[in-house]
Amino acid sequence: MGVLWWIVVGLIAGWATGKIMRGSGYGPVMDILVGIVGALVGGWVMRALGFAGQGGLIYTILVAILGAVLFTWLLRLITGGKDRGAGDIRRAA
């Protein structure tokens, strides 16, 4: 059940991150992976700030989204902002 939990939270966080970061995401599998890595990053950040990790489903999803946004931002810094999303207006011009 724990693996299914990580996949569901990762999917939600990855999808939300794709919407927040103005892109169409990286595809379903990569969105899940970005969400899972985001959950790990978000959990680490929250623990470093002194917040306990006992908040239930909504808390877990919000922390995962926060971490996924940070992770995606760092990825874009490293890769030079290259987005493979089809929703990028600059590409169409």
Image: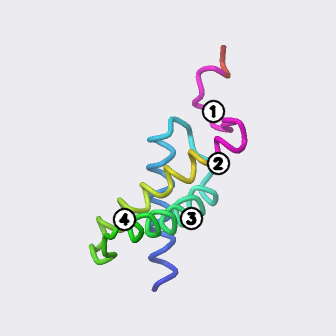
Mark 3 and mark 2: Cα distance apart in space: 12 Å
Q: Mark 4 or 2 closer to N-term?
A: 4
Per the image, label 3 sits on a secondary structure element best described as helix
Q: Which residues are magenta?
A: 75-90
According to the image, label 2 marks what residue? 75
According to the image, label 4 marks what residue? 49
Q: Mark 3 or 1 closer to N-term?
A: 3
Mark 3 and mark 1: Cα distance apart in space: 23 Å
Instruction: For the residues labelled 1 and 4, say whether their Cβ atoms are less than 8 Å apart.
Output: no
Q: Nearer the viewer, residue 18 or 48?
A: 48
Q: Mark 4 or 3 closer to N-term?
A: 3
Q: What kind of residue is marked 2?
A: Leu
According to the image, label 1 marks what residue? 86
Q: Mark 3 or 2 closer to N-term?
A: 3
State which quarter of the image contains the N terminus.
bottom left
Per the image, label 4 sits on a secondary structure element best described as loop
- Residue 85: image x %, image y %? 63, 37
Q: Nearer the viewer, residue 80 or 2?
A: 80
Q: Is residue 85 magenta?
A: yes
Crowdedness of circle 1 by 10 Å Cα count: few (<14), some, many (20+)?
few
The residue mark sitting in front, 3 or 1, is 3
According to the image, label 3 marks what residue? 37
Instruction: For the residues labelled 4 and 3, say whether their Cβ atoms are less than 8 Å apart.
Output: no
Residue depicted at 42% across the width and 55% down the height? 66
